[in-house]
Every structure is written in structure tokens, then in C-alpha cells.
Amino acid sequence: MLSTSPVEAPTAVGFPRESAASDRRTLLTPTTARAMTTAGVLVLAESGIAARIGNTDAELEREGVCFAAPDDVWAAPLVLRYKNPHPSDLSRLTPAQSIGALFHAEGDPAMLAALADSKTTAFSYEFLRDAGRFPLASAGGRIAGVQAVLAGSQALQDPRGRGVLLGGAPGASPARVVVIGCGNVGSAAAQTAAALGAQVTVLAHTRQSADRYRQRAPHGVSVEVNCPAKLRELLVSADLVIGAILISTYGTPAMICEADLERMQDGAVIVDATCGYGTGYLPTAGPVQRPGDPPRLVRGVLHVKQDALPVLVPRTASHAYTASAAPYLVRLARHVLTGQPDPQVASACIARNGRLVHPVLREHAAFYGLEGLG
């Protein structure tokens, strides 16, 4: 159904379609729609918003969604996207509006400038912090961890690869997998590799994080504290290395350099599941690759570096993400539309009144020479 006066409603939230034609994911699943309308929010959406993940307009209408023209959807007091809009999309907003998305804006100088120029209030879901955790990064991280192992498994079967079956076979030695990091991505990678039958070692950032992860690690997974000596020891026999640290940026020290590749077996595989910005902690992985690109061969070691693995599984990603995000999206709507205080939601605010307000964005803006935005 079409809303007759959507943008006049003070409780309206607009859900435009994603900017990238290749991105089939959507934030507006029946789960999100049900949570929003139950909370008294008027949900406006573009027709066909969820069609590419198998949900029809009729299904969303049954959950109370109103369909409207794109300009009306973009004119809602609060606009919600799955991924960051194109920087030019922000020119459609006024300073009185707010927008939420997985921006990852710190790696995009054009987006940082657009956020400031629009003077809108922007929230980036991945920064939302609750009880010391980042709950809106969990689903995507876990999906990326599973996919990192599957991508590594395929690379091992590349003609240049080790020729090792990650799932193993009777009479053959199990594959050796090293996972750097034990957060959402790393723990999912370790669980997947162990379930396939690999011999898995997880390297945690600190002794405390190692102790915490050890309590929930899958049976047979070894847990160690990451240090250069331990990593180099493990690289010698590793078939697959999964890089899954939380943050990799311009100032992050390298963990594996070209000299370390000389210690590794020919055809071993490194998968950078974090990617981040700049050369980061896995500089030999090189630039980000596109889906379908062959692994990059450096000093006999294959490298896979993709920064948007969940985009390859849009149905799984959309439904898994919104199942965990829906309650927080409702809280975001209440915070923006009614002024209800919510410190956890406020922690995700990245821009307001033409200024970047989140420290991570301000740090990166300074790196790009955009200090005036902070």
C-alpha cells in the first residue's frame, strides 16, 4: 500500500533500496518490519526492497510496511540502510534528518567529507557498544569467519595451492589452520575449520582474551597468546592462515611480512578477513580483491583479501543480521524520533551538525588531511 502523507509522520522511518546494484542485501526483512511496527513506528520503503532476498512486497505489507516513492522514503525523519550509501546520496538529506547504516566511513575520505557537508546526524551500526561488546558487528563477523575458511579451502585447491583438503580424508594428515584473532570473525573461522576436521590453533591478542576464548573454544582447538615468536613458529607448518583481528588500519604493525613467507610451505594460503585500511597487519596480501579474482601469489604463498564476504550470501546475511539488529534499530528509532536517551545507541553516532564526532573517524580524517571536519 502507498502512504498518503508519509514524511509528515514524526515517527516515520524510511528504508531506501541499497545504492550498489550488485548488493542484494536489505535491512528491511519481515523481522525488522514487525519489530518496528510493533513499536509504533511508521515504516516507509521503496517497492521491491527485499525482492532479491526472496521477500515480496506483500509479505512486508502484512507486517505493516507502507510503500512510497523514493523521494518520500528519503525524506523520512530517520533513514536506515544496510550498507553505507554512496556519498552523493547524503545530499538528499537535510540537517534535520538522521541516517543509520554500516558506514565503515573511516576508510573513505569522500564519505567523511559528505557526512560533514550534509550536516545530518549519522549513526554507524558497527560502532554501537553495549556492555563492552559491539553487537551489531556480530552477525556479519561470524558470516565472514565462515566464508574466510571456505575461501581458504578453495585456494588450497588452486593449481598453485598446497593441494590439501581442509575437510580431511582417512589416511591423510589433517590440515593445519592458524587463526589470528578470537572475536566474531576468528571464533567463527576456528569453529568452521575444526568442524571440517582441521587441526586449529587460535592466537588471541592478550592472555585475558585467550583465557576467555579458551572457555568456549571448540574441542581440540589450541589457544595461544599471539606474539611474533609463536606466530612464526606456527607459520612453518600452516596450510591456511586466517587473519581475523578486529582493527587493521594505517598504523597497525605488520604481523606477517615477506621474510615470514619464506618460512611457509609453498602453496600455503593466507586469507585476510579483516582487510581494513592501508597495508595493515598483513601487508603481503596487497590490495583488496574483487569476488571471483584468483588468489594473489607472493613468494609461493597464495593470498585472498576480500572486504565484503557477506555480500556474496545476501539472503543469509540479511536475515541473520536483522535477527540480531532489529531490537537495536527500534531503540535507534526511539532515540532519534522521540529523543529517548540511550547511551548505547548514542555510542554509534559518527557525525552531527557538520562535524565528525566519533574518535575513529576524527583520527582517520586527520590522516587524510581533513582535520577541519572533526
Image: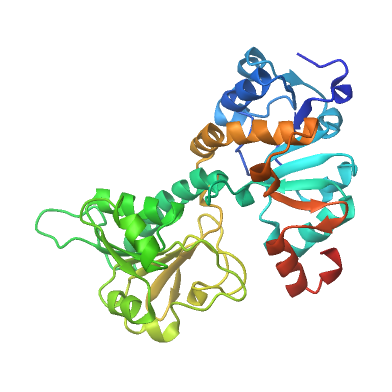
Q: Is there any visible trace of residue 234 in the rendered image?
A: yes
Left or right, 127 with respect to 93, comes to left
Q: Residue furthest bottom?
A: 259
Q: Position of residue 294 (x, y in %)?
A: 47, 63
**Left or right: where does residue 50 sit relative to residue 231?**
right
Please give the name of the residue rendered at 42% of the width and 52% of the height, measured from the top-left corner. 145
The residue at the point 90 percent across, 44 percent down is 95
Q: Residue at x 55, y 62 (%)?
A: 289
In depth, the one of 2 and 158 nearer the eye is 2
Tell me how the rendering is colored.
rainbow
Q: Where residue 286 sits in the image (x, y, percent)?
A: 54, 73
Residue 83 in sight from this viewpoint: no
The part of the image, by quadrant, that contains residue 331 is top right
Q: Residue at x 55, y 64 (%)?
A: 247
Residue 374 x %, y %: 81, 64
Count of residue discs:
0
Residue 54: image quadrant is top right
User: In the rendered view, would you say 313 is above or below 243?
Assistant: above
Which residue is at the front of the view, 23 or 232? 232
Left or right of 121 on screen, residue 30? left
